[in-house]
Each structure stands twice: as structure tokens, then as C-alpha cells.
Amino acid sequence: MRALVWHGKEDIRCDTVSDPEIEHPRDAIIKVTSCAICGSDLHLFHNFIPAMKPGDIMGHEMMGEVVETGSEINGALKKGDRIVVPFTITCGECDQCKRGNFSVCERSNRKKDLGDKAFGHTTAGLFGYTHLTGGYPGGQAEYLRVPFADKTHIKVPDSLTDEQVLFLGDIFPTGWQAAAQCDIEPTDTVVVWGCGPVGQMTIRSAVLLGAKQVVAIDCIAERLSMAEAGGAITINFMDESVVERLNELTGGKGPEKCIDAVGLESHVSMSQPDTLLDRAKQMVMLESDRPHVLREMIYVCRPAGIISIPGVYSGLIDKLPMGMAMNKGLSFRMGQTHVKRWTDDLLRRIEEGQIDPSFVITHTVGLEEGPEMYKVFRDKQDSCIKVVLKP
């Protein structure tokens, strides 16, 4: 089969690789009908996430048709079923899965020893996302093996297009969880840093959850325009002071809820000296992540507010003002997305027409064009916000 394969920093190729096979009775094989390039794939593209190996298949946002099932699927799936595959692999039986904490499933990381060393205790296995999370082949491919497939799937109706439901596997529940863990109240100002695909879903989730006002921060015109269309007040941080504008919008008190949809690769700007220092430290391996957004959120957040972090961080950050956060009594809520916790409700909202997640798609291309589209997406060329690949 054909697949997008990691060969090193900024080196993704469309290669011919072996077809996946059933390896365990709870496996299924799907023929991938649609997959996508995610912002967190760029962290792998830039080699900021450790434990990638040449030959690893990329991708963790995919869906398709079941073509084969293992002997212990027990009727949960059958050939021909149309499913979205969550990026988090879940057994459905461990203590964490029973609590709905699916991104920290205790059984699905097949390289638990590595996960334990890196994180203290292992997290769930993830598709296409380093050997720290199992080294599972990803879904930017013609076929995909789905471990624990009786639990790791979302059945979708034929009445909805791939484009409407594809993002149930990652960015839609990620944006929803980012907003939901803020405990939004009708009097709240919710501020979202980053208007990429996850930021766009977060903005619309915060609106659906009833925030008084939602503010979106970015510097890319197309992203800001899309955020405004979704109901957000926008701030271009290259043109105006984020601190001053947020004080204006909140009567000088600051926003109650702040969401980091950027993660470890904050924009580097001459007007923000800390970003230059972070980039220099990152280049010489004195720091793994660029936490400008975290610093700014801690500074502007209203005392006793909530900071929500769906953005991916890979390791160590520097100069984080913990004293400020502690004295202001801020609560931090973060983590990879517990996808299956949210998807029944989100699928219902799509079916009822409350939201059509396909709004975020700007480019649809064949799998062979994937390597070039990584660069287009990275560089925001051609007004690119979200890329869907058709194997």
C-alpha cells in the first residue's frame, strides 16, 4: 500500500509499504477513505517530539471502511461498517477507561516501558505519534490496523459525508474538551490563543457552550476571518497589544477562561523578546518548547480563573511564572483528548445541524501530494488552514 512515511526532520515521503495484517483477535483493518494533516503532525515534521524512527507511518486523524476483523471483535464491528478512528487507542476495560480518561488508557501503549520512563507512568497508545506512545503506524495510508478495534472506533451514518465526521477523531473533540474543561458560565469571557484547526473548533465549542464573549488571538488574516465568522472577537497580536485589548474587553479584570490552542511552537516575533530567547534555547537544546502563550495567559487571566491547554507540549519549558499562577489561584487543565468521552454528543450535534466541522477544510488532495502539503500547511501558503487527504 501507499503511505506517508517519516524519514527524518522535514522529510515526509509517500512510500510503498507492507499492508497491515490482523495481529491480535481484537484488531480490525480499515480501508482509509479520508485522513488529514493535523497541527500536531508538524511537531513530528520538525522533529520536536522524541522517539520517531525512519519508516514510521504518519497520521492520527482518519476514517474508513472495515474490511477485516479479528476473532474477538464479538459483533462490535463487521465488514463494511463505516467508522472514524479516534487518535487515542483505548482498551475500554482498565481503570482509566472506565473513568472516561481514554487518553491515559493503561493497556494500549505497547511500549509501556518507554512511556513509563518518559512520563513517570505511561499514557495511552496513539496512532502515528512516536514510540513513546506505542509506535503504532498512522492513518495517512491506504489501509490501517486498528488495535482494540471493538472499543477504538466511532460508527458514523451513511447520511453524513466523510468531511462532516472525519474530525470526530481528533480536532473537534479536542476543541470541545478544551472548552468543556473550562466550566464555561454565561458571564464568562473565553480567550483562545491560536486560530488553527483546533482553535477554530475550540471557538465554536465555547460559543455552543454559552460563553458571553469569545476572543480569538492569531496573526494570520485567513484564520482570524474564519474565527470571526464563528462568532469570535479577534485580536491580531502583530497589530495591537493583547494585554491592553483584553483589559478593554473585560473592564480591566481579565478573562475568566484562557485556552492555549498553540502548544510548543509559539510564533517567533521581534516584538516578543521571550519568543526569540525560547527559539535560541530550543536550537541548542536548552529548552524543548516555546511557552510564550502560557506566560501570556498566566499574566492576563483573571484571578481564580482557569487555564486550559489542548496545545501539545513535548518536554521542558523555561521561565514559566509559577509564582504568578499560584498567587492568582489559577487552575490548569490539560491533556491529550479523551475522544470517546465526547463523540456521542458531538455526532448528535452534527446530525442536528448545530455544527458542520467541514467548514475548516481549505485543501483536499490525493495521498501522493501529502509531502508537499505538509510544507504548504506549515508555511500557511495558499490560505491553507486544514488539509484532507484522499488515499
Image: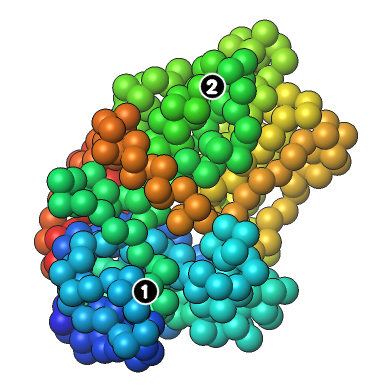
Q: Residue at x 53, y 21 (%)?
A: 211
Which label was assigned to residue 245?
none
- Residue flagged by tag 2: what amino acid is it? Ala
Can residue 164 be seen here? The reply is yes
Q: Specify the quadrant of the image occupied by residue 13.
A: bottom left
Foreground: 66 or 119? Answer: 66
Left or right position of 155 against 49: left
Which residue is the extreme one toward the front?
Answer: 75
Mark 1: few, some, or many residues within 10 Å (few <14, many ≥20)? many
The percent position of residue 42, horizontal first and vertical second, equals 39, 59
The percent position of residue 104, horizontal first and vertical second, equals 59, 66
Q: Which residue is mark 1?
A: 149
Give the secondary structure at mark 1: loop
Left or right position of 109 against 135: right
Mark 2: few, some, or many residues within 10 Å (few <14, many ≥20)? many
Q: How many marks?
A: 2
Left or right position of 134 against 249: left
Q: Which residue is mark 2?
A: 211
The percent position of residue 75, horizontal first and vertical second, equals 30, 74
The percent position of residue 51, horizontal first and vertical second, equals 51, 78
Left or right position of 98 against 223: right
| Quarter of the image with the C terminus in it | bottom left
Q: Residue at x 40, y 38 (%)?
A: 201
